[in-house]
Amino acid sequence: MTVAARSADAELHDAMSHFATDPEGFVDFAYPWPINGEPGPDPLQRAFLRKLGEKVRANAFDGVAPVPPIRMGWSTGHGTGKTTEGAWIVDWIMSTRRNCRGTVTANTNDQLEKKTWAAVREWTARCITRDWFEINSQIMYRRGFRAEWFCSPASCDEHNSEAFAGQHAKGSTSFYINDEDSNVPDSIHEVEEGGLTSGEDMIFLFGNPTRNTGKFHEAAFGKGRDRWDITVIDSRESHFSNKTLIEEWKQDYGEESDFFRVRVRGLPPNADELQYIDHGRVAQAQRNVAQAVMGDPLIVGVDVSGGGAAWTVARFRQGFDARSLPPIRLTGEQTVKNDRQLVIAKLADALDSHDISAMFIDSAFGAVIVSRLRQMGYTQVHEVNFGGDASDVHDANMRAHMWRSLKEWLPRGSIDPKDQRLATDLTGPGFHLNRRNQLVLESKESMQKRNIASPDDGDALALTFAFPVRPTAQTQRKSVNYANMSGSGGWMSS
């Protein structure tokens, strides 16, 4: 090798060292843009790469002590460039992390061979580091380091789970990329998790949400969503998608059809008939214009976490507008830390910053918060017992009553169309009627057994319907009188 060649190779190694924490910069640098008329990644692809870089920098892996695994992905419609995104990630990790080890899979062998792994081979052939690697249909490896620095395609057949086992890269990165993941068996996911225990490990799930069960659904929409960073992508937002075809699908099937939800909107098919709030009502509220009539009271509902995976959520509603003011969200750990002082401080700040007529707080874990806020002079703060008696004889308890009111409000109400967490929560709970023909909403405990996330955001919005509230000119630190609180039609007012 000539001096000039050694110098160029050293410069390339230095560049790759720099891009170890900057996948977006790597993609811009490593490929000969423009490619097929494209000047670079789509904005959606860039956003994903940028977020990935932020997570890597936050972990600050030192090459010795293991860091929390990075779990990311897309739940997307067709034609958004997700397979290409996976190929870029393979090249980025392989080019910037010595002795990394990776596995790539897809829902079928045909998809894996002809699309997913084919994309890896295509983009690696374009990559500025291509001469570092040998790549064929069976493996990609760093020349001279085949046994310790590699990435391989593997069938997701349940009987092939051993191909995913034992993949560890102490001091480097063990990584998995699952394409069309909604139909990758749960057993494969479970084995992959075992490979995320040693260094700076990563796993990426990309797919159309063709099922409303399974590990992909759980990661994107269910109880695993707090451990995963899954972005829901509507195909219409992508530069690459066929907009004419999408419009034809919309006309043929309808925007709320399962076909359109899965293949365009990146959403799972509709739940079963036991679902209390249907997707149609949620979609209507997402489309509605946010507007409130002058004099509508501003109401806040607060669902308080007892710790663990549940969140503390405060949501704002003014008449038919539950979109304009963003929610306050705190993890279970943030909630219980320092005797709930952070929650109290956040809610007090909201009460000082906004003309809030009433704040309703779930009493299960929020009674002490209500007590403290009222001691501080915020007498528009009230405790609500989810299991308490409802004012309507058709509801088994207060929680059922509030969710019934929320369901009736949605067709005219307005919620943030990009708030997928709220949309998922609203359509999560099931229901049944008891022997007295009263509405009983599914409990959080029952939902968790079905791998459905605790509907903290849904409960918070439902709490804004706890009792009718009469608007007043002055709401800060005011007294609130209760009128006919146990009967229908009562008001909270000053």
Image (tube, helix red, strand yellow):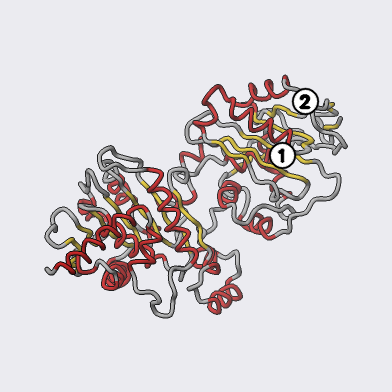
Residue 277 located left or right of residue 221: right
Q: Label 1 amino acid?
A: Thr
Q: Quadrant of the N terminus?
A: bottom left
Q: Spatial distance from mark 2 to mark 1, Cα to Cα?
A: 16 Å
Q: Nearer the viewer, residue 316 or 22?
A: 22
**Residue located farthest toward the front when viewing the structure as drawn:** 3
Residue position marked by numbered label 2 in the rendering: 379
Q: Is residue 114 left or right of residue 454?
A: left
* Helix, strand or loop at mark 1: loop
Residue 464, labelled with which disc?
Answer: 1
Residue 440 visible in this rendered orientation of the protein:
no
- Could you tell which of marks 2 and 1 lies nearer the N-terminus? 2
Residue 468 vertical placement versus 260 (above, below) = above
Q: Residue at x 60, y 67 (%)?
A: 255
Could you tell me which secondary element the residue under label 2 belongs to? loop
Q: Position of residue 133 (x, y in %)?
A: 19, 65
Q: Residues within 10 Å of mark 1 (few under 14, many from 20)?
A: many
Picture layout, residue 5 above or below residue 418: below
Q: Is residue 383 visible?
A: yes
Query: Quick check: 75 left or right of 5?
Result: right
